[in-house]
Image: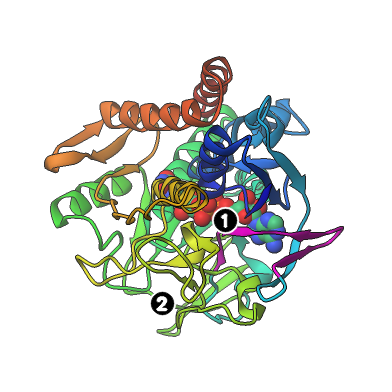
């Protein structure tokens, strides 16, 4: 029986694993390795950071459960081995993967290891800013937010800095502002308790969306009390300050870094792997790793140039999910001796949540849905994803938990 090894159980790895299991359960031995025991639903991480009244649940069990989906729940009754272990080395020549506790051999390899936070070499980012990539980061931000607001005074409001004006930075700044207001209101704080500032190094936040929609989001952020500082590259981050390239020093209580991602560090040391200048894996149009016949790569750890735009496809959950589908299909095709299927990039849909039950959704054919119904669209997209990886009962229960927990600060 052929051995298929999947590295990483994120949006790409899970999709591929489920599709492979459905089609090849009696023809191949499928194994998925992830360093965590759960799939982290990153699109709702900002909701955990800004969820209200976490203290009622001191170990944050409900919050963790709302976005950390255990693999045993996803792969229940599936003929697939899930191993929790951290991959440390990949030996392409020997067809082996080394993890902390074991060594795995494979006939076919699927690399879906995701990305890491990019600090762009700016001093202090790693040490002092919250890297917004794990459940622990989100819970720390949440705790610090409530503490800082309660400790604020007339002369020293809590200063919250979000660095990076992409979708993650925008949704986080907007939602932290809503949560901060709720904490101040419930604790009867009458003075100005906080400020929220969103920094963007480039000339514009969200440069990838149409100008009219960008202006809409800017107005919404202003209404929520978020100050947006565009053209403000950061030079240094300290324990309680940031220094801008223009020499300005600003004191802050909470500094969150959402300014970008880079390739998984592990890929650097894989001998014989073709990587781009940014360190990501290069694949062909079938998502097959360059110069290999039995290795595929998908998701954030890949640099795939869209033939239409000649630019890399963006690092998005549904892009990773689509690539997972194509890579699984191609592994099935190889094993069954059929021709490979080309990956066709699709990434023109976006939803920008902007505080509370409010979002701007850009759908097919230029349709926009804004406000409460935009938020509903976002919830439907999340539910659709949950239904694609869980049984209907589990998916609905998870969505119910999310909605009831995350709307408490609205
Ligand atoms: C805060 C945040 C919010 C986001 N919001 C959205 C959104 O709203 N919509 C959207 O489309 N995209 C969003 N994204 C982007 C999206 O989450 C990524 O594009 C997507 O997760 C990529 O999927 P992936 O499978 O490539 O990697 P991931 O989902 O990151 O999965 C990689 C997996 O590999 C595992 N792993 C890594 N290294 C090792 C190792 N050495 N050994 C074992 N396991 C390892 C990790 O534990 C992880 O489970 C967001 C990203 C972030 C950080």
Circle on res. 329: none
Q: Which residue is mark 1?
A: 132
**Residue neighbourhood size for the residue with mark 1, other residues' Cα within 10 Å, grouped as few (<14), some (14–19), many (≥20):** many
Q: Is residue 110 magenta?
A: yes
Q: What stretch of residues is rendered in magenta?
A: 95-117
Q: Does the closest atom of ligand 1 sit within 8 Å of the Cβ of label 1?
A: yes
Q: CA distance from mark 1 to mark 2?
A: 19 Å
Q: Tag 2: Cα neighbours inside 10 Å, few (<14), some, or many (≥20)?
A: some
Magenta span: helix, strand or loop, mainly?
Answer: strand
Residue 233's tag is 2
Whether residue 157 appears in this view of the structure is no
Q: Where, quadrant-wise, is the C terminus in this rendering? A: top left
Q: Earlier in the sequence, mark 1 or mark 2?
A: 1
Which residue is most to the front? 337
> x and y percent of residue 280 in the render?
49, 72
Report the residue at 44% width, 49% height from top.
Answer: 333
Residue 393 in sight in this render: yes
Q: Quadrant of residue 398?
A: top right
- Determine the residue positioned at 31% across, 37% down: 359
Q: Are marks 1 and 2 in contact (CB under 8 Å)?
A: no
């Amino acid at each position: 029986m052929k051995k298929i090894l999947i590295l990483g159980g994120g949006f790409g790895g899970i999709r591929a694993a489920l599709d492979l299991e459905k089609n090849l359960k009696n023809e191949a031995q499928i194994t998925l390795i992830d360093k965590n025991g759960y799939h982290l639903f990153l699109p709702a991480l900002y909701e955990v950071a800004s969820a209200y009244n976490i203290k009622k649940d001191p170990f944050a069990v409900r919050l963790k459960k709302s976005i950390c989906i255990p693999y045993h729940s996803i792969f229940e009754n599936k003929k697939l081995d899930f191993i929790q272990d951290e991959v440390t080395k990949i030996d392409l020549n020997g067809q082996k993967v080394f993890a902390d506790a074991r060594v795995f051999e494979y006939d076919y390899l699927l690399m879906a290891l995701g990305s890491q936070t990019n600090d762009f070499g700016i001093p202090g980012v790693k040490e002092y800013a919250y890297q917004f990539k794990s459940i622990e980061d989100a819970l720390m931000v949440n705790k610090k937010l409530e503490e800082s607001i309660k400790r604020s005074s007339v002369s020293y409001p809590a200063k919250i800095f979000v660095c990076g004006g992409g979708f993650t930075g925008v949704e986080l700044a907007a939602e932290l502002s809503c949560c901060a207001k709720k904490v101040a209101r419930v604790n009867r704080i009458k003075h100005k308790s906080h400020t929220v500032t969103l920094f963007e190094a480039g000339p514009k936040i969200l440069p990838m969306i149409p100008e009219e929609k960008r202006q809409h989001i800017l107005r919404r952020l202003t209404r929520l009390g978020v100050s947006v500082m565009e053209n403000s590259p950061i030079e240094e981050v300290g324990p309680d300050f940031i220094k801008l390239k223009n020499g300005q020093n600003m004191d802050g209580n909470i500094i969150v870094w959402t300014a970008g991602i880079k390739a998984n560090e592990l890929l650097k040391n894989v001998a014989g792997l073709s990587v781009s200048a940014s360190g990501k894996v290069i694949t062909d149009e079938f998502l097959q790793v360059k110069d290999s016949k039995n290795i595929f790569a998908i998701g954030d750890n890949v640099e795939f140039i869209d033939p239409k735009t000649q630019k890399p496809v963006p690092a998005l959950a549904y892009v990773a999910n689509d690539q997972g589908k194509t890579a699984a299909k191609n592994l099935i095709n190889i094993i069954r001796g059929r021709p490979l299927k080309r990956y066709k990039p699709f990434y023109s849909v976006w939803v920008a949540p902007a505080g509370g039950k409010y979002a701007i959704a850009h759908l097919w054919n230029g349709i926009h849905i804004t406000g409460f119904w935009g938020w509903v669209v976002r919830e439907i997209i999340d539910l659709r994803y949950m239904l694609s990886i869980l049984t209907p009962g589990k998916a609905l229960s998870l969505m119910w938990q999310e909605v009831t927990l995350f709307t408490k600060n609205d």
